[in-house]
Amino acid sequence: MSKIKKPEMTDAGLGFSKPAIAIDERGNSRQVELVGERALTIYVDKQEIVTLMTMGTHPELLTLGYLKNQGFFEHINEIKLVQVDWETEAVAVVTNHENSDFSEQMKQRTVTTGCGQGTVFGRLVDKLKNITISPLNFKQSTLYALLDSLKAHNEVYKKAGAVHGCALCTASEIDFFIEDVGRHNAVDAIAGYMWINGLAGENKIFYTTGRLTSEMVIKIAQMGISILLSRSGATQMGLDMAKQAGITLISRARGKHFMVLNGARNIKFNMDMTYN
Amino acid sequence: MSKIKKPEMTDAGLGFSKPAIAIDERGNSRQVELVGERALTIYVDKQEIVTLMTMGTHPELLTLGYLKNQGFFEHINEIKLVQVDWETEAVAVVTNHENSDFSEQMKQRTVTTGCGQGTVFGRLVDKLKNITISPLNFKQSTLYALLDSLKAHNEVYKKAGAVHGCALCTASEIDFFIEDVGRHNAVDAIAGYMWINGLAGENKIFYTTGRLTSEMVIKIAQMGISILLSRSGATQMGLDMAKQAGITLISRARGKHFMVLNGARNIKFNMDMTYN
């Protein structure tokens, strides 16, 4: 990999949540925290690409990760500038290319929704065929230590709900944690973080509060990540895709519980669970 | 409204979930239920429209509701046939139009994700400007009776997780309940159910397990529904949209708890909560 030259970027992250007044079941007025949700339209070399709905905590990383995951760019050095302006709800990306034309990428663009609408699905499955993930051995004790570390995060979820959290992890350590109104935004922002820091997915664990659907597994495979861990359940197709790519898939990880759906041979069960 | 002539339809609903083998935290092998997830590509008069990822329990209603919510059709009588074929993962919709051309609708199509990617957002907000929902008075006791009725549903969620449930309700009665891997699919299938049965949204309550984001509220407004009820939280923009359209918005409805974020004047607090 050639040397990374980070693009010039704004630092326009927004706060998590804002107060609102609600009436509770006793008829009492209470202050609650509501998650912010903003529209952000991405322009690359003045060409409009997409509008994302986001909490806006890491708009620059979200933009970079979205463009990377959608195949607009290969190398971070192609990008010169990422400039977020909330006034106009726009982010301007300037590349080092002259006469750039993204009509091909726009046609090919995959709208991964995770909510199951709009997927150009065949193309995604085709992509998966070329991916094989190297297995990562992982101890049960490390998994529990990681779940403990994750407890401290998920703050917005606990405070305001209505968000999904995702984390990029190494062993029991959290490298980067992000929450957003859409779980695909959270994944894309982590892809942006990995891209700009030149991180590969090997030896990484990806944690999500969200469901393990086919589209989620495919994105994680594209990012080359070995272990995918969720507090929620998986779909059958999510499991099929994990098997195909060789991703260790762990669902329903809460407290001391978890379910390994694929790659159990990579997990070392080193805890005495007799009294649990 | 002119008389409804229902289209000819297949009845190709799939079962909920299928068994898989997982290894639990004790290293024991256990049978778990995983939600099915299938790709379904919609063709209208042989023109490819979109591929949806769905559990497939109500593929015909999902198809109809998707097309209605995306503005492809106004009247159900325009549609002659809805034919689902899981072998080819396709649904063929045949209209009564000659030489139909959907290029305009395709351009205008809103990819509502609920996961916050791909929205042609401005167009949605514009649509909302023309909508005013008539308020519906609702008793706290009826709300609790409805939450009790809903408990019996949510079966897939309880069994397999990884899904969102939605229900169309009248007072404490559930008219139609559906679960899908994507909450927007569940909403669209309910729109299909309303469309084919000639039901208006007035006097209806819409329940969802999912988050109350802007896109969810806009869809409910389009369907003319008075009260939107969720067991999850809302975003700030979701609340703004509900205020604009006049939708009564109730979040965090679980057990005896709930939070009215908009339209509290429509709720009659008729329960003695002293001992709760």
Image (tube, coloured by chain):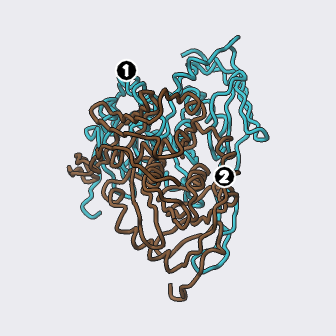
Chain colours: A cyan, B brown
The answer to which of B214 and A37 lies nearer the viewer is B214
Q: Residue at 33% across / 56% down in the picture?
A: B156
Question: How far across and down, in percent of the image, does residue A197 sit?
Answer: 59, 29
Q: Tally the marks.
A: 2
Q: Residue at 46% across / 61% down in the picture?
A: B168
Q: Is residue B247 above or below residue A79?
A: below
Residue projecting furthest to the top? A98
Residue projecting furthest to the right? A87
Q: Quadrant of residue A44?
A: top right
Query: What amino acid does circle 2 point to?
Result: Gly
Q: Mark 2 = which residue?
A: A36
Q: Quadrant of residue B126?
A: top right
Q: Secondary structure at mark 2?
A: loop
The answer to which of A198 and A121 lies nearer the viewer is A121
Chain identifier of the residue bearing label 2 in the image: A
The answer to which of A115 and B10 lies nearer the viewer is B10
Q: Residue at 70% across / 57% down in the picture?
A: B244
Binning the other alpha carbons within 10 Å of mark 2 as few (below 14), some (14 to 19) or many (20 upward) gives: many
Q: Mark 1 = which residue?
A: A130
Query: What amino acid does circle 1 point to?
Result: Asn
Q: What whole-number distance in Å separates the C-alpha atoms at marks 2 and 1?
A: 38 Å
Q: Quadrant of residue B228?
A: bottom right
Q: Is residue A209 visible?
A: no
The answer to which of B238 and B193 lies nearer the viewer is B193
Q: Are marks 2 and 1 on the same chain?
A: yes
Q: Secondary structure at mark 1?
A: loop
Q: Is residue B222 visible?
A: yes
Question: How far across and down, in percent of the image, does residue B266 sit?
Answer: 63, 74
Residue projecting furthest to the front? B2
Q: Earlier in the sequence, mark 2 or mark 1?
A: 2
Question: How far across and down, in percent of the image, does residue B109 sit?
Answer: 57, 36
Chain identifier of the residue bearing label 1 in the image: A
